[in-house]
Image (tube, rainbow, N blue to C red):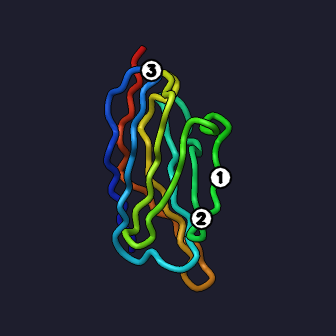
Amino acid sequence: QVQLVESGGGLVQAGGSLRLSCAASGSIFGTNIMGWYRQAPGKQRELVATITNDGSTNYADSAKGRFTVSRDNAKNTVYLQMSSLKREDTAVHYCYARVLYGSTWYTFWGQGTQVTVSS
């Protein structure tokens, strides 16, 4: 079992920056993917960025050039550095982990952290 705990959300003005952190406890090892999704009011949850255990990254088009996902494998922690924030980035941001145990993938979610961007 894996538990994910996010931190770093809050209120920021448009154009500002925030850094989200997500610490994982439990069995995160081997082949895995960690990252971030977000969900704005009235919208579906969507990908922001992910990073594999060997450092390969994937970004939503809306995040490219503004956000950077990184991880510290020794600390089982994934980060999301967000810059040039826009009002449309306002959403609950969820930490995500997908772990391969044997031949089965398991998905885990954090409780979410609110990011609010004001104009």
Give percent across and percent down for residue 29: 48, 78
For marks 3 and 1 on the same chain, the one whose residue lies earlier in the sequence: 3
- Amino acid tagged 3: Ala
At x 33%, y 28%, the residue is 11
Direction bottom: furthest residue: 102
Q: Quadrant of the N terminus?
A: bottom left
**What residue sits right under mark 1 in the picture?**
58
58 sits left or right of 113 in the view: right
At x 42%, y 32%, the residue is 17
**What residue sits right under mark 3 in the picture?**
14
Mark 2 vs mark 3, CA separation in Å: 29 Å
Residue 55 is marked as: 2
- Amino acid tagged 1: Asn
Q: Residues within 10 Å of mark 3 (few under 14, many from 20)?
A: some
Q: Considering only vertical position in the picture, is 114 above or below 110? A: above
> Circle 1 — which element?
strand
Give percent across and percent down for residue 77: 40, 62
Q: Residues within 10 Å of mark 2 (few under 14, many from 20)?
A: some
Mark 2 vs mark 1, CA separation in Å: 10 Å
Q: Considering only vertical position in the picture, is 60 above or below 75? A: above
Q: Considering only vertical position in the picture, is 69 above or below 60? A: below
At x 44%, y 65%, the residue is 72
At x 63%, y 34%, the residue is 62
> Front-most of 31 and 109?
31
Q: Quadrant of the C terminus?
A: top left
Mark 3 vs mark 1, CA separation in Å: 24 Å
